[in-house]
Amino acid sequence: MSNERGHYGRTTIGADAPSRGHSIGTWIVGGLVVGGAILWARHQSTQVARLYAASDLPYETFGQDLRARTRKIASSAGEKIQGIGRRLSGGRKAP
């Protein structure tokens, strides 16, 4: 009697599954899904901008908001580092 341990159906436990490439249909459907998601997000962004414009509220895009926050964090960090430097030097001014 042969050793049938680990054999279930046509696969062997622990053996690598046969690799198959993706079909062209999979790539096309994936591209359509990603393209649709990008178009939907762009549409939503336009709708939000229109709502802000209609209500006369200030509106910043994600990039503008990110830029402003980054500048604020960088300036705050610079001030804190300068404060630490002043404390360590005993309040003396650098030449």
Image (cartoon, rainbow, N blue to C red):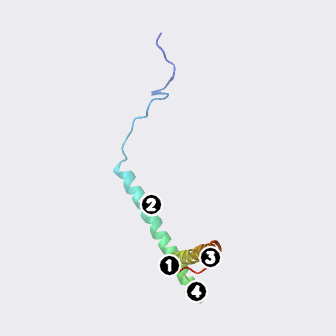
> Viewer-nearest of labels 4 and 3?
3
Left or right of 71 in this view: 34: left
* Crowd class of label 3 (few under 14; some 14 to 19; many from 20; radius 10 Å): some
Considering every residue shown, the one lying at the far top of the view is 1
Q: Earlier in the sequence, mark 4 or mark 3?
A: 4
Q: Which residue is mark 3?
A: 86
Left or right of 82 in this view: 13: left
* Rendered image quadrant of residue 87: bottom right
Q: Which residue is mark 4?
A: 58
Q: Residue at x 60, y 77 (%)?
A: 79
Q: Which residue is mark 2?
A: 33
Q: Which residue is mark 1?
A: 46
Considering every residue shown, the one lying at the far bottom of the view is 56
Q: Determine the CA span between mark 2 and mark 3.
A: 56 Å
Q: Residue at x 49, y 17 (%)?
A: 4
Residue 94 position within the rendered picture, expressed as x and y whole percent measured from the top left: 55, 79
**Residue type highlighted by circle 4:** Pro
